[in-house]
Amino acid sequence: MLAFTKNVSQARLRRVWPAALACCAVAIAMQTPAHAQVMKEKDITEQSITNALTPNETTGDVLTRGFVLSNQQPGAMSAKAKRPAKAPSAQMLITFATNSTDLTSTARGALDKVARALQSDKLSAFRFRVEGHADPRGNADANMTLSQQRAQAVVDYLTQQDGIAAERLSAVGKGSNEPLNTRNPAAPENRRVTIVTVTD
């Protein structure tokens, strides 16, 4: 009887094990941050930036010719439902001259595409925060200063060269506080510029 029970348990385990592994794989994939995707300059397009930065509010309502058909009681819509849980952002590898705030020619070309996206119908009403990030090598204070100056260099280029209104952009230095690749401190994705849509 004991041997029979053991054989049944092993057979059941063989059937259940693949499904359990699949569930674990899905759970791990869901924990992988979506924002870890960083666009290289050659991959930056007006459309990719527009898609990344456009807020996508999901309220459960249907809008038809000025009327809102809602499945909720009046006044029941929460603030959480009215705005996205996290502000849309675009992570980009914008290149600078070594230990400098001077944009490379490829960086300027990529930022021209970013500017066209910011002037598009979908984004023209929004403000944006430009965040500079550094890798953790070197002095933390120096990294913070450099990241702030590089974020400001991006803002200056977008406003002075591409005509984006200065009041729509702000520059913030993050230093090395938010690395995307913690396993490899020198990874290029840790030296990046992030543009975040200001939704509040």
Image (spheres, rainbow, N blue to C red):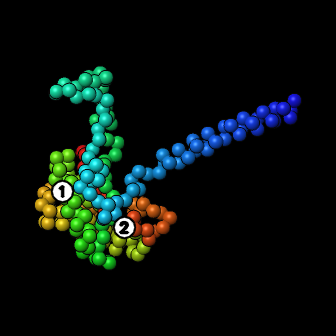
Which residue is at a point 28% across and 28% down the rendered structure image? 61
Whole-percent x, y for residue 95 in the image: 30, 70
Whole-percent x, y for residue 117 in the image: 21, 54
The quadrant in which the C terminus is found is: top left
Tell me if 5 is positioned left or right of 142 in this view.
right
Whole-percent x, y for residue 199 in the image: 25, 46
For marks 2 and 1 on the same chain, the one whose residue lies earlier in the sequence: 1
The answer to whether residue 145 shows anywhere in this view is no
What is the number of the mark on residue 191? 2
What is the number of the mark on residue 61? none
Residue 159 picture quarter: bottom left
Which residue is at a point 22% across and 28% down the rendered structure image? 63
Instruction: Give the tally of numbered discs.
Output: 2
Whole-percent x, y for residue 11 in the image: 75, 36
Which residue is at a point 30% across and 50% down the rendered structure image? 52
The quadrant in which the N terminus is found is: top right
Q: Residues within 10 Å of mark 1 (few under 14, many from 20)?
A: many
Q: CA distance from mark 2 to mark 1?
A: 24 Å
Which residue is at a point 34% across and 63% down the rendered structure image? 40
Residue 144 picture quarter: bottom left
Residue 42 picture quarter: bottom left
Residue type indicated by callout 1: Arg
Q: Secondary structure at mark 1?
A: helix
Q: Check the image and report above or below for 101 versus 29.
A: below
Tag 2 near tag 1, CB within 8 Å: no
Residue assigned mark 1: 116
Tell me if 88 is positioned left or right of 167 in this view.
right
